[in-house]
């Protein structure tokens, strides 16, 4: 499937995916979601890609939400399917097994905030605004916003954002843990690239196991999650990269991880 609404670049082991519908503030329509699904599956399979940056085209928006024009014509069954389809794509991002950095360059509203929350790490430009304004459309979030938001910032704050529909600025998002860091707008992509390159140099299997342990562990009772961690620890300890990492430490040199 040729991507019409996405730009895909490579910088060494880092892939940069840009949602490219700036005329509608990068709103997510069905085609864009489908393209995103294909790209995520491709990047997951591509052993040469070890980290991904997701951002929006233009200076105004990361993603201003689901495409309201398309959404307005959905009936009840269609809307449910639409929500499930988007949730599936966002789950694929969360479970890609590689770090996905959301470089939030402007509005991240509704589905845009939900997309950022499905990413592994969020960096925001200082002028970015994040929120779940669905309530103002007589809707509720449909791409897991009611679930990922309270997991990230706690139920009380999440309920206020979800019920008020009021977006918050980047600094407030940082204060409450919705974004990991805030940078000047003109430094956003260089910060994201530096972070991604650093993560791309880590042991890929250990990276995958950490992401799995955290994300899947959050859905498990603590005892079960700890046993899951121990199993992944056992798998990590059996990798060549573990041999390389420990040997490099003892030889006082930088490790070279191969993902094996
Ligand atoms: N969908 C479609 N078009 C959009 C969207 C959107 N989400 N956001 C902006 N646009 C369009 C505008 O219509 C406008 O188009 P045009 O130039 O043709 O009039 C263009 O982008 C520029 O936008 P504005 O003129 O509105 O720009 P402003 O700077 O005045 O305002 C805002 C920027 C505040 C971001 C404003 O555009 C806005 O409020 N946008 C909508 C934000 C929103 O409500 N998002 C949530 C959408 S619902 C959602 O995401 C649900 C997700 C789960 C769905 C599950 C399936 C059932």
Image: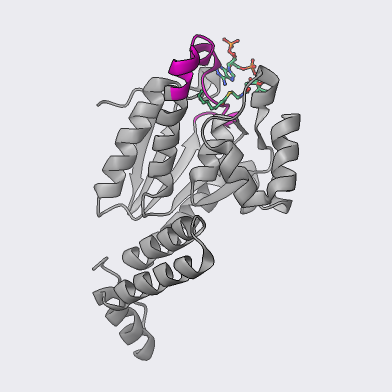
Asked if residue 201 is positioned above or below residue 236 in the image, the reply reads above
- Residue lying at 26% horizontally and 54% vertically, measured from the top left: 48
**Can residue 75 be seen at all in this image of the molecule?**
yes
Residue 66 in the image: state x and y as whole percent.
52, 24
Q: Magenta segment range?
A: 57-80
Which colouring convention does the figure follow?
one colour
Residue 183 or 162: which is nearer the viewer?
162
In terms of image quadrants, where is residue 243? bottom left
Residue 79 or 33: which is nearer the viewer?
79
- Residue lying at 38% horizontally and 67% vertically, measured from the top left: 202
Q: Is residue 202 left or right of residue 134?
A: left
Residue 199 in the image: state x and y as whole percent.
43, 61
- Residue lying at 40% horizontally and 25% vertically, measured from the top left: 32
- Residue lying at 26% horizontally and 74% vertically, measured from the top left: 239
Quarter holding ligand 1: top right
- Considering every residue shown, the one lying at the far top of the view is 73
Asked if residue 248 is positioned above or below residue 157 in the image, the reply reads below
Asked if residue 146 is positioned above or below residue 208 in the image, the reply reads above
Residue 252 in the image: state x and y as whole percent.
38, 88
Residue 203 or 164: which is nearer the viewer?
164
In the rendered image, the quadrant that contains the C terminus is: bottom left
The stretch drawn in magenta includes residue 1: no
- Considering every residue shown, the one lying at the far bottom of the view is 250
**Can residue 178 be seen at all in this image of the molecule?**
no
Residue 253 or 203: which is nearer the viewer?
203
The stretch drawn in magenta includes residue 75: yes
Q: Is residue 7 left or right of residue 214?
A: left
In the rendered image, the quadrant that contains the N terminus is: top left
Asked if residue 32 is positioned above or below residue 215 in the image, the reply reads above
In terms of image quadrants, where is residue 13? bottom left
């Amino acid at each position: 499937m040729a991507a019409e609404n996405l730009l895909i670049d490579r910088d060494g082991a880092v892939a940069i995916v840009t949602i490219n519908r700036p005329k509608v503030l990068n709103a997510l329509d069905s085609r864009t979601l489908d393209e995103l699904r294909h790209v995520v599956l491709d990047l997951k399979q591509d052993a040469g890609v070890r980290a991904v940056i997701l951002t929006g085209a233009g200076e105004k928006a990361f993603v201003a939400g689901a495409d309201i024009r398309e959404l307005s014509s959905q009936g009840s069954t269609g809307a449910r399917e639409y929500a499930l389809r988007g949730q599936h794509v966002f789950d694929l991002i969360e479970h890609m097994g590689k770090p996905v950095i959301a470089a939030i360059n402007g509005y991240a509203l509704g589905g845009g905030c939900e997309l950022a929350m499905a990413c592994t790490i969020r960096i925001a430009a200082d002028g970015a605004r994040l929120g779940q304004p669905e309530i103002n459309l007589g809707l509720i979030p449909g791409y897991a916003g009611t679930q990922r938001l309270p997991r990230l910032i706690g139920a009380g704050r999440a309920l206020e954002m979800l019920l008020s529909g009021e977006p918050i600025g980047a600094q407030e998002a940082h204060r409450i843990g919705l974004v990991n860091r805030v940078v000047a707008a003109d430094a956003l992509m260089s910060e994201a690239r530096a972070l991604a390159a650093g993560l791309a140099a880590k042991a890929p299997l250990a990276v995958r196991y950490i992401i799995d342990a955290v994300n899947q562990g959050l859905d498990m009772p603590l005892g079960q999650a700890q046993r899951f961690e121990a199993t992944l620890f056992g798998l990590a300890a059996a990798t060549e990269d573990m041999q390389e990492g420990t040997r490099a430490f003892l030889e006082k040199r930088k490790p070279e991880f191969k993902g094996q």
